[in-house]
Image (cartoon, helix red, strand yellow):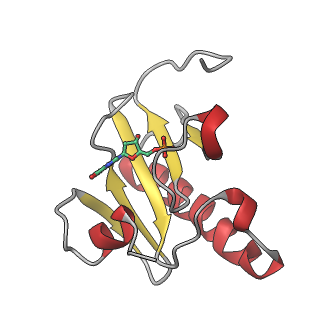
Amino acid sequence: MSDSLFTRIIRREIPADIVYEDEHVVGFRDINPQAPVHVLFVPRTPIATLNDLGEEHAELVGRLVLAAAAYARREGFAERGYRTVFNCNEDAGQSVFHIHLHLLAGRRLGWPPG
Ligand code: DGP
């Protein structure tokens, strides 16, 4: 299978505004932001959808959430608040099949989401 778009971003083959990196996770700004802050947190290991997760990925998924929370603290909006979202497959509108945690912040976010 060919490399996912996000794998190519992680490898710097496609430009992106990378704002967070650790051993397991890379965060970069969404190309089509839905809020003043919209960052995607992506595991370096490509996994297509949440349906492909196994027990062996439990720590990795936790690392995505920890990375988003660390970024929110670092950027100073953790107390004000933010939203994290994983979209899975068609009904949720998933368009890139390499799991990613959306972090949205910087405005009041409506609920329920559309
Ligand atoms: P999802 O719908 O959950 O699969 O979200 C995929 C997101 O990826 C979507 O909000 C737009 C973003 N995206 C798509 N292509 C690119 C790209 O080439 N660069 C960046 N930075 N973001 C992208």
- Which residue shows up at 32% across the image and 30% down it? 36
Number of numbered discs overlaid on the protein picture: 0
Q: Looking at the picture, does residue 104 appear above or below residue 47?
A: above
Apparent side of residue 87 relative to residue 12 in the rendered image (left or right): right
Apparent side of residue 20 relative to residue 112 in the rendered image (left or right): left
Q: Residue furthest right?
A: 55
- Which residue shows up at 19% across the image and 65% down it? 14
User: Looking at the picture, how far across and down is residue 58, in whole percent?
Assistant: 76, 73
- Which residue shows up at 65% across the image and 74% down it? 60
User: Looking at the picture, how far across and down is residue 59, in whole percent?
Assistant: 71, 76
Q: Residue furthest front?
A: 1
Apparent side of residue 52 relative to residue 26 in the rendered image (left or right): right
User: Looking at the picture, how far across and down is residue 62, in whole percent?
Assistant: 68, 67
Which quarter of the rendered picture does the C terminus lie within?
top right
User: Looking at the picture, how far across and down is residue 97, in whole percent?
Assistant: 51, 58
Q: Looking at the picture, does residue 39 appear above or below residue 45?
A: above
- Which residue shows up at 38% across the image and 28% down it? 35
Q: Quadrant of residue 77?
A: top left
Residue in front for this viewpoint, 24 or 87: 87
Q: Quadrant of residue 83?
A: top right
